[in-house]
């Protein structure tokens, strides 16, 4: 794939996934990349999340995974995360790309090509 024929930015999403531990974050990251559901997963340690759950406000340290993938792969990625994530209702949200560096987008397309 050349830069001239790379997929447009709107074909890709960034997926945010919070996890309770570094171990869960690493397992998710390695699984998603190994299965080519994401080209890259960046793990951010110890983010602080404040949220409502079971009628009360919770204040927890979590880990944030930022996965980069094709928009068309989101449903499969989501289902894979759900199959191994320990939360009852994990955060799995996708944000479409509005713009991106062409060589990076070409790499992202190459690394997430369906088998």
Image: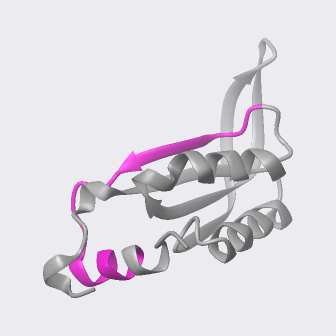
Q: Is residue 96 left or right of residue 74?
A: left
Residue 33: quarter of image: bottom right
Position of residue 19 measured from the top left corner of the image (x, y, whole percent): 75, 51
Q: Which residues are magenta?
A: 89-108
- Where residue 1 appears, as percent x and y from the top left, is 28, 86
| Above-or-below relation of 27 to 89 | below
As drawn, the residue found furthest toward the front would be 115
**75 or 20, nearer to the observer:** 75
Residue at image position (48%, 65%) is 68
| Residue farthest along the bottom direction in this orientation | 2
The residue under the point 80% across, 67% down is: 27
Residue 52: x and y in percent read 70, 22
Residue at x 83%, y 52% (from the top left corner): 84
Residue at image location 76% in from the left, 49% down from the top:
61
Q: Nearer the viewer, residue 85 or 54?
A: 85
Above or below 26: residue 72: above
| Colour scheme of the picture | one colour
x%, y% of residue 53?
76, 22
Given residues 32 and 114, the one toward you in this image is 114
In the rendered view, tell whether residue 77 sits above or below residue 108: above
**Residue farthest left in this picture:** 4
How many numbered badges does the structure rendering display? 0
Q: Is residue 74 magenta?
A: no
Placement of the C terminus among the 4 image quadrants? bottom right
Please tell me which residue lies in front, 23 or 69: 69
Vertical comparison of 113 with 59: above or below:
below
């Amino acid at each position: 794939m050349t830069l001239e024929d790379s997929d447009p930015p709107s074909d890709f999403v960034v997926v945010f996934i919070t996890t309770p531990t570094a171990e869960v974050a690493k397992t998710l990251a390695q699984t998603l990349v190994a299965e080519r559901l994401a080209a890259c997963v960046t793990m951010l340690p110890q983010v602080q999340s404040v949220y409502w759950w079971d009628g009360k406000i919770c204040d927890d340290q979590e880990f944030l995974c930022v996965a980069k993938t094709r928009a068309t792969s989101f449903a499969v990625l989501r289902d894979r995360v759900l199959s191994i994530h320990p939360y009852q209702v994990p955060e799995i949200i996708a944000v479409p790309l509005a713009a991106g560096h062409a060589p990076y987008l070409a790499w992202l397309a190459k690394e997430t090509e369906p088998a």
